[in-house]
Amino acid sequence: MEAHDGLSAKIVQEAGFRGIWASGLTTSAALGLRDSNEASWTQVLDVLEYMSDATTLPILVDGDTGHGNFNNVRRFVRKLCERGIAGVCIEDKLFPKTNSFIGEAQPLADVDEFCGRIKAGKDSQTDDDFVLVARVEALISGHSMEEALRRAEAYHAAGADAILIHSKKSDADEIFTFAERWGNRAPVVIVPTMYYSTPTELYRQAGISTIIWANHLLRASMAAMRETAARIQEDESLVRVEGSVASVKDIFRLMGNAELEEAERRYLPAR
Ligand code: SPV
Ligand code: MG
């Protein structure tokens, strides 16, 4: 489940998910920026540190294109490991990236060059359990299924732990075709943002390893914030919103104020 800051990371954990997708789109948007590598990678790292501190769930980071070439990827991976991040996903496009749902036929990276990014990332992890997911953009940028499979195989051979196959079709047909032809050579990750109506059980039956619900907490909060702002602006009063927003007490609870009170009893001199 997507998260984009410490608060949303806590909400994902509270809801019972098993892992967090640190989305590039929503992390950027939460900073007021476009999904075009406008946030520097160290700024992204700062957000990830808050998220990592806020939750015990594994975090898979949307590493975009890896913030440059192989050299940028290996430094990024080392820093992610230092911050207790579980894995990174890099996509086979060029820096600066553009969100996959914008425009048509975005240029793809050269396969060998991208394999170098994958190898450099895997060679740089300092945590044995760290995973690198290689994201295949062939289908979404208008290439054939053959090209998607060729790229997935090359990335797998280069050391990728899993393959994310991306699609912007409104149905999941090409995802199922890919999964069938791929035959689970490595785990498959999908992002059904555009093809959202397919039941998850069908993905299970097709052997898909992981589904990323990629941006829905940010989108939910945008809708809620807009509605609340408009009501207060219109009414010049809180009366209509008080019942529909989280209570202040709920903020204290989620941030763990009870732990601080307990720590104060332990560490502050008795009064
Ligand atoms: C993201 O969440 O930033 C992603 C997924 O990369 S998508 O927006 O579908 O490309
Ligand atoms: Mg992204």
Image (tube, grey):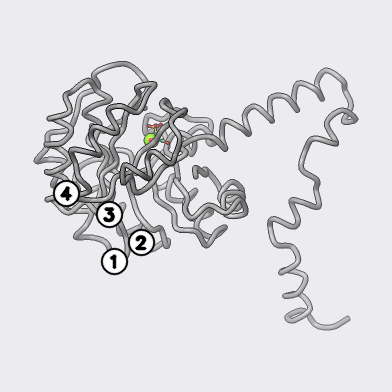
Residue with the mark numbered 4: 156
Q: Amino acid at mark 3?
A: Arg
Q: Quadrant of residue 96?
A: top left
Q: Are marks 4 and 2 in contact (CB under 8 Å)?
A: no
First in residue order: circle 1 vs circle 4:
1
Return the mark for residue 126: 1
* Secondary structure beneath label 1: loop
Q: Amino acid at mark 4?
A: His
Of the residues tagged 3 and 1, which is closer to the observer? Answer: 1
Residue with the mark numbered 2: 81
Of the residues tagged 3 and 2, which is closer to the observer? Answer: 2
Distance between the alpha carbons at the discs numbered 3 and 2:
10 Å
Of residues 78 and 129, which is closer to you in this image? Answer: 129
Return the mark for residue 190: none
First in residue order: circle 3 vs circle 2:
3
Q: Are marks 4 and 3 in contact (CB under 8 Å)?
A: no
Q: Position of residue 81 (x, y in %)?
A: 35, 61
Q: Position of residue 27 (x, y in %)?
A: 48, 39
* Secondary structure beneath label 2: helix
Q: Position of residue 41 (x, y in %)?
A: 37, 44
Of the residues tagged 4 and 3, which is closer to the observer? Answer: 4
Q: Residue at x 27, y 39 (%)?
A: 135
Residue with the mark numbered 3: 75
Q: Residue at x 31, y 67 (%)?
A: 127
